[in-house]
Amino acid sequence: VPSVVGNLAVLEVLDLSNNLLNSSLPSELGMLGGRGSLTRLGLSNNAFTGVIPYQIGQLQGASVLLKDNRFQNTSTTAPLSLCLEREVKEFDLADVTALCPPDRNALSDFYDTAKGAEWTDGSLWLDEYASYCGWKGVTCDDNKSHVTKLNLANNGLSGRLSNSIGKLTFMTELDLSDNDIKASIPTELGK
């Protein structure tokens, strides 16, 4: 896919599915459709590889269809904003745990509800590609796939604890002492 495709500012649908297209996706795909006119980006059933550009996650209101390519064969996750479907209407790989790890999604929700933008140190939190195991205060198992500890003591947290923290089912240690968390502890924690 040539990068000049990003110049198609009023495009509503781009469907290049079921071809033999290969290579990596250009970041310019994120400029398709200008201000929200693109409703569908269909690139399924090809042979695309490499990193999924985070710009694709900014296609407001669009369905992003990338199944049956070779993204799962890499060690790189999909961009966080795309996995969370913050701007896009649909991302057909959002349930593929190798690309969109559930622990990363849960931690992202935790960050939002605990007012992460105001934390004393939120190093790497919400980075589009950084492993959540390297986020400030997060410790993972040896396979780097599950959160086992979350230590954000004295880090300026406020807001409330998200119910999604209960989705961190491998977590054995949680230290949020000396912060200003409001409301009660979610019942999902400890299940």
Image (cartoon, helix red, strand yellow):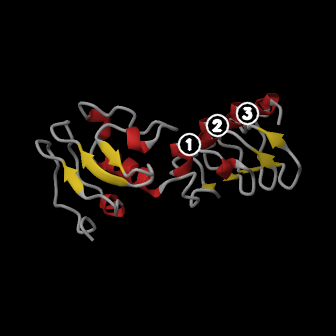
Q: Earlier in the sequence, mark 3 or mark 2?
A: 3
Going by the picture, which residue comes out furthest to the left?
178
Query: As displayed, is residue 28 above or below residue 57?
Result: above
Amino acid bearing label 3: Pro
Q: So how many labels did they put on this image?
A: 3
Provide the residue designation for mark 3.
Answer: 26
Residue 10, percent across and down? 77, 38
Q: CA distance from mark 2 to mark 1?
A: 7 Å
**Residue found 52% across the figure and 38% down from its top:** 129
- Mark 2 falls on what kind of element? loop
Pointer 3 local density, CA inside 10 Å: few below 14, some 14–19, many at least 20: some
Residue 56, percent across and down? 64, 40
Amino acid bearing label 1: Pro
Cβ atoms under marks 1 and 3 closer than 8 Å: no
Provide the residue designation for mark 1.
Answer: 79
Provide the residue designation for mark 2.
Answer: 53
**Residue found 35% across the figure and 31% down from its top:** 123
Locate the C terminus and report the quarter of the image it occupies: bottom left
Going by the picture, which residue comes out furthest to the front?
142
Q: CA distance from mark 1 to mark 3?
A: 14 Å
Amino acid bearing label 2: Pro
Quadrant in the rendering for residue 92 = bottom right
Q: CA distance from mark 3 to mark 2?
A: 7 Å
Cβ atoms under marks 3 and 2 closer than 8 Å: yes
